[in-house]
Amino acid sequence: MKRTKGTRQETFHFASLLLQACALIAQAVGVALPAAALLVGATAVGYAADLGMHAGRTAPPKILGQLQAEAVTRQALRDLLLVAGLLRLADGPSTGFLLLSLAGLLFAHGAHVLLQAGSVLVQRGRKLPVVTRNIDTSGLRLPPAPPFVITRRPGLRLLLAELPAVAGLSATAAGGHTGWALGGVCLTVALSLAGLLVLALAFLPGRRAPRPEAVMEWFDEWLRDYRPTVGMYFSGGSSSAYQANMWLPALERLEGRPVIVLRERAMVPRIGPTDLPIVCLPKVADLMRLGDTSLKVLLHPANAPKTSQVLRIPSIMHAFVNHGESDKLSSCNPYAKAYDEVWVAGPAARERYALAAVGVADEDVVEVGRPQLAGVERGSGPVPAGTPVTVLYAPTWEGWTDDPGNTSVILAGETIVRRLLADPGVRLLYRPHPLTGSVDPRAGAANRRITELIEEARGAGPRPGATPEQREALERTERELNRLTAAWSLTSADDLERMADKGRDGDVTVAEAMRRAADEWEAVHWAALPATEHQVLVKDRPGLYSCFNHADVLITDVSSVISEFMPSGKPYAVTNTTDLTEEAFRATFPTVRAGIVLTPTAKGLDELLGVARGTHDDTLVTAREELRAHLLGPAVPTSAERFQEAVHALAARVDERRAKTAADPAQAVPRQRAEAV
């Protein structure tokens, strides 16, 4: 099975720590014997393993800090054993010389502590009350950050500073002149002093971050100049960023001046490439400033604990747009009644709320369609004779609740995949939900077994069926996308660096460059994919809608994937892993009524493939069209037009409310006096 990036990093860190532990034991043995070769060799191995672990892109495991076994502790042990070994050697340097070396090492460790304390102060000072992207911050005169290795990589900083001392002491222990040790220790002291000097520059008046008050004054001025009218509010963990990112294209097409409002600093680099202004306001008091602006409407793709905080602003109206609709109970959350309006795709969701009786009034439900689905292409009917059928298997995850039938991966996934792989006329695209296995370990285990089955059937190599030219084009476009992704996300940057970033890549914005590169990558990806090559799709690319366009049929569970697949008009199947009969299953979950129902033993799969090949009558084609209209609303006006109209209508309600408040002094909010009288 192919290892994930996270698994590879964990394995590397574990191997490095194990190697360091063995090296420390070998050092101790070298001191006890004494044996110069063993002492020097073990020191070199342990130091190199530690340096390799800290030089990587990912930080060492946090548990090391909890166990008080961080780099400073490990390096102090290596230093102590190295000096003790020199004392034990019969022809080693004098005690006075070793004390001098020990004093230099102690200075390096003391400087490390001072550097860490200063780094903490610098980073706190560079954490502003608001973080922005795609906004001109030249008026703030944001200072550059100190070198990354000094302020944000303490373990690497210490190891690099001690490299000369370790090398010099090791050379002396191996039989070299004492000058090696003295020179190495002196160079380490010099590097430590240089680090302190560089960090001290960050405390000079011209290098300090602007005061929080000045930053908020600048932000208020930007709000007055930009005059945002509609925004998307999002709060949540890093893994939930996709819920906001799916709405970026629709938000970008809106009239007026859209803005994205976030609450967690870590979410800023997680928002996908966009040219829209992004503001992150972690504190509630700063969030409340939005109430005195031109902002009228906030759209909410998800419910979050911090959502209730922004709902307190009376001058803004809020619409819940969700991040997907399905027949699952989670699609009718009682929290939805907290919003001014609930925007749904079509009549099906309106009926769902009415049946659920969770307190959402029918007049507050607005049908806007799904503007994100504009790129889903219409199917052209059965595949030509002799052409493999491309099957997209996109099961959902197990969910936060133990509702039966949430995911087919556990009970039916392997059976379905085995049947598909056994058919030489099928190409399988397997795209599991990104959260599969996060709640139920059985789902994660089944997902891994399915992946193994597909990779075994697929063959070895990254793209075994692609030509050398196609593989080269894939690698080139992948490198370009990775470069642009790094330029956009700025994962190693702090708040000020993200705010100061111009977001440009030559003559275009990074967001536009990424859109072009992504389109090119997807075109190359599908062109290089042989008609019979199976794929496991667990990355962001290719996107789900791109998979829709290249699939002939869909197999999924009761999830929002069904609604999003509807514009294609292609056949689909839903796996029934509940204890319901097929008739009861269709009655309970309306999105199933235009699809073929699969059992856990994959009964119904032959019918689905027959419809795709044209060897079986497609008796559900009319039902799919009716269901599409029921789930997504009418084709005319378009979803984008209905979405825009809903924004205008809700903004008009805000204007009406504000006009009434302004005309009635009794409704006006009192202001604080400027001074006591």
Image (cartoon, rainbow, N blue to C red):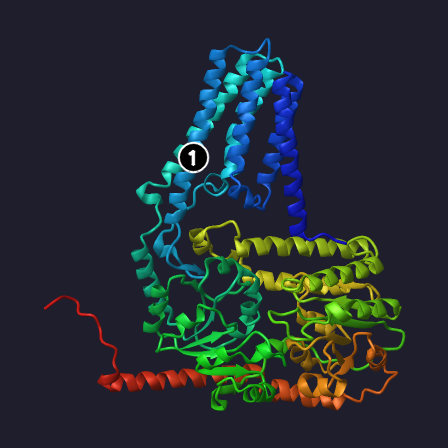
Residue 177 in sight here: yes
Q: Position of residue 616 (x, y in %)?
A: 86, 84
**What residue does disc 1 label?**
113
Tell how many labels. 1
Q: Is residue 358 above or below residue 62?
A: below
Residue positioned 23% across, 84% down in the render = 666
| Quadrant where the image shows the N terminus | bottom right
Q: Is residue 135 above or below residue 144?
A: below
Q: Amino acid at mark 1?
A: Val
Q: Quadrant of residue 64?
A: top right
Q: Position of residue 498 (x, y in %)?
A: 46, 54
Return the residue nearer the eye: 55 or 105.
105
Q: Is residue 449 above or below residue 590?
A: above
Residue positioned 75% across, 71% down in the render = 392
| Quadrant where the image shows the C terminus | bottom left
Return the residue nearer the eye: 270 or 159.
159
Residue positioned 80% across, 64% down in the render = 534
Q: Residue furthest top?
A: 91
Q: Position of residue 131 (x, y in %)?
A: 42, 58
**Residue 342 appears left or right of 422:** left
